[in-house]
Image (cartoon, rainbow, N blue to C red):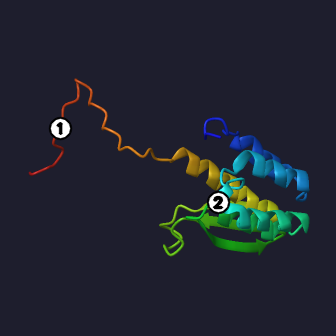
Amino acid sequence: MTTALRHYDALSLSERLRNAHAMTRPLMLDIIDHACRRFPSAGQTERSARVTRLIDAEAWADAALALMELELPLWQVRRIAYDEGEWYCALSRERELPDWLDAAIEARHADLALALLSTFVEAQASAAEVSRPSVPSVRPAFNSLYEPVVCDNFG
């Protein structure tokens, strides 16, 4: 299926994850159905089978991490921390950068698997937004009223 046909509402999926108390099989399958593009592909049968086995075993956190590895190969887990009853998770494309320079995606939840999947859904949504075409784009023409102005103070 094309990306346009598989478009999903990341906000409603994030809302469902935020409101869930614990991970369930139907919720995990719904996330795979709506947010995953690579899971059913023929070239990833071994990895997809691994995720399926983890779901069958109800190893939700491991299944979430395996799903991230399959669907977001350029992203890495930057942080998993537990503080005051909540799990804090962060995914990053540039894990080696200092925290203040990195544009990590973060989420939190009382359940580890739900926190991981919340970051996954947000990362999938941001990756879909910045997908680049295979052909370079042309810069838009400037407005005819556009006139450059020098703002330097030489005095």
Q: Residue furthest top?
A: 144
Question: For the point 70% across and 40% down, which residue is it?
Answer: 8
Relative image position of residue 12 (x, y in whole percent): 76, 41
Toward the viewer: 155 or 21?
A: 21
- Measuring 90% from the left and 56% from the top, which residue is drawn there? 25
Q: How far across and how far down the image is residue 95, in percent?
A: 54, 72
Where disc 1 sits, the SS reads: loop
Q: Is residue 110 visible?
A: no
Query: Vertically, is 37 above or below 78?
Result: above
According to the image, label 2 marks what residue?
A: 43
Q: Nearer the viewer, residue 120 or 155?
A: 120
Pointer 2 local density, CA inside 10 Å: few below 14, some 14–19, many at least 20: few
**Quick one: 54 or 23, which is closer to the camera?**
54
C-alpha distance separating marks 2 and 1 = 54 Å
Q: Position of residue 11 (x, y in %)?
A: 71, 42
Q: Amino acid at mark 1?
A: Val
| Residue that lies at the very extreme toward the front in this rendered image | 42
Element type where label 2 sits in the image: helix
Q: Is residue 10 visible?
A: yes
Answer left or right for 28 relative to 79: right
> In the image, 148: left or right of 64?
left
**118 w.r.t. 1: above or below:** below
- Do the numbered discs 2 and 1 sit on residues whose CB atoms are within 8 Å? no
Horizontal arrangement in the rendering, residue 86 relative to residue 122 (left or right): right
Amino acid type of the residue tagged 2 in the rendering: Gly
Residue annotated with mark 1 = 149
Q: Which quadrant holds residue 117?
A: bottom right
- N-terminal of the two: label 2 or label 1? 2
* Quarter placement of the N terminus: top right
Which residue appears at 66% of the width and 35% of the height? 5
Q: Nearer the viewer, mark 2 or mark 1?
A: 2
Q: Which mark is residue 83?
A: none
